[in-house]
Image (cartoon, rainbow, N blue to C red):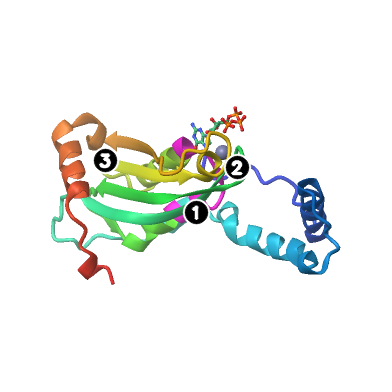
Amino acid sequence: MTNPPTPVRPSREEAEEAVRVLLRWAGEDPAREGLLDTPSRVARSYEEFFEGYAVNPEELLQRTFSEVDDYDEIVLLRDIRLESHCEHHMVPIIGRAHVAYLPRKRVVGISKLARVVEAYSRRFQIQERLTSQIANTIDSVLEPYGTAVIIEAGHQCMTTRGVHRPGVSMVTSRMLGVFRDNSDTRRELLSMLNRPGMSEFSA
Ligand SMILES: Nc1nc2c(ncn2[C@@H]2O[C@H](COP(=O)(O)OP(=O)(O)OP(=O)(O)O)[C@@H](O)[C@H]2O)c(=O)[nH]1
Ligand SMILES: [Zn+2]
């Protein structure tokens, strides 16, 4: 469920050649000086943009803590910067994610929630699937009372090309367990999200 089957990877040289082809498709001369190192830069950038394929998000959540003195309220990680790529046009999706869960006895280190967001973002995505994958993984590994993921993002395939609508953002959410079934819990989450930012604590 978490990792797609790994296709046979091309060689680094094949990847760089593909960049040269795209440069020529754009109307460029890949042999001109300024572009000579571009194929290798792009190959390296791709290793970074898409490093999520090599990460198993479920493993990130294995370490949990149980000494929480009966803490039984929502845990919310708000405004997680999200950088992904649209699988339709291979251009950036930039936004933020909010991840919440209602723990059942055990909690996870909060950075791990951001790492799960990152593991799925650093792949080719559509926003709906990205949202579901993050929520489903947290829900199945931690087995909390509920999990909620909300993503708000701008898609460069809509802002810099095609329909050209700058400023438009797409909002998606996936609510599981109590966040789906209990409107009071869902409302509490939304009110936590609407509270003014606490930037003085986030330096
Ligand atoms: N649902 C969804 N659609 C997306 C996402 N990212 C991009 N799209 C849309 O995917 C669609 C692809 O549509 P196509 O008609 O096949 O491609 P296209 O001719 O390039 O479409 P335009 O973008 O309208 O020029 C477009 O409507 C995009 O806006 C996403 O994360 N979720
Ligand atoms: Zn797109």
Q: Dot 3 lies on which element?
A: strand
Which span of residues is magenta-colored? 117-129
Mark 1, residues whose alpha carbon is within 10 Å: few (<14), some, or many (≥20)?
Answer: many
Q: Which mark is residue 119?
A: 1
Quarter assignment of residue 4? top right
Residue 108, image x, y percentages: 31, 58
Residue 96, image x, y percentages: 38, 51
The residue drawn where x is 48% and y is 37% is 129
N-terminal of the pair, mark 1 or mark 2, is 2
Three-letter amino acid code at disc 1? Ala
Front label number (1 vs 3): 1
Residue occupied by mark 2: 4
Q: Which sits in the foreground, 33 or 99?
A: 33
CB under 8 Å between discs 1 and 2: no
Label 1 to label 3: alpha-carbon separation: 21 Å
Q: Which sits in the foreground, 190 or 34?
A: 34
N-terminal of the pair, mark 1 or mark 3, is 1
Three-letter amino acid code at disc 2? Pro
**Ligand 1 within 8 Å, label 3 CB:** no
Q: In the rendered image of this protein, does residue 181 appear above or below residue 196?
A: above
CB under 8 Å between discs 3 and 2: no
**Ligand 1 within 8 Å, label 1 CB:** no
* Residue 186 shows in the view: yes
Three-letter amino acid code at disc 3? Gly
Q: Which sits in the foreground, 67 or 133?
A: 133
Label 1 to label 2: alpha-carbon separation: 13 Å
